Image (tube, rainbow, N blue to C red):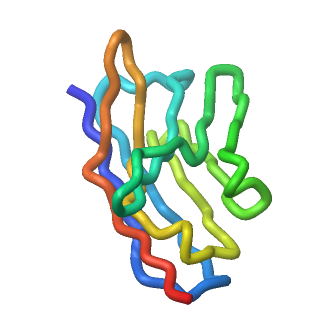
Amino acid sequence: QVQLAESGGGLVQAGGSLRLSCAGSGRISSTNTMAWYRQAPGKERELVAGIYPGGTIKYADSVKGRFTISRDIRKNMVFLQMNGLKPEDTGVYYCYAPIGTGGYWGQGTQVTVSS
């Protein structure tokens, strides 16, 4: 059984920073894709950043240059460093791990950026 638990969300002023953490447990291999998604009120869930097999990293255009995804394989954790936060970054941030034919989601952590 795979479990993902996010932490690190909160309320921050525009221009501020937050660091999200995702702790994974269960059968998550070191080469498994790990990603961060977010869902703003009234909008669909969208990909923010992902680490793919081979170390490829991709970001949504809206966060390039501001967000950094990283991974601690030994601790089975994934991080999202968010700098230069904007009000439009507000939403619930989810950790996601596609495994086999399915995928696993964390419970989400709320990020609110005030203007």
Identity of the residue furthest to the right in this view: 65
- In this orientation, which residue lies closer to the viewer: 47 or 2? 47
In the rendered image, residue 24, in percent from the top left (x then y), is placed at 36, 41
Q: Is residue 84 left or right of residue 38?
A: right
In the rendered image, residue 22, in percent from the top left (x then y), is placed at 41, 51
- Residue occupying image coordinates x 54% and y 67%: 89
In the rendered image, residue 14, in percent from the top left (x then y), is placed at 61, 84
- Residue occupying image coordinates x 45% and y 52%: 38
- In this orientation, which residue lies closer to the viewer: 8 or 90? 90
- Residue occupying image coordinates x 37% and y 11%: 100
Identity of the residue furthest to the left in this view: 1
Identity of the residue furthest to the front in this view: 42
Q: Would you place residue 95 above or below residue 87 in this image? A: above
Q: How many marks?
A: 0
Q: Quadrant of the N terminus?
A: top left
In the rendered image, residue 60, in percent from the top left (x then y), is placed at 66, 46
Q: Is residue 2 left or right of residue 36?
A: left
Q: Quadrant of the C terminus?
A: bottom right
- In this orientation, which residue lies closer to the viewer: 91 or 57? 91
- Residue occupying image coordinates x 34% and y 10%: 101
Q: Would you place residue 18 above or below residue 54 in this image? A: below
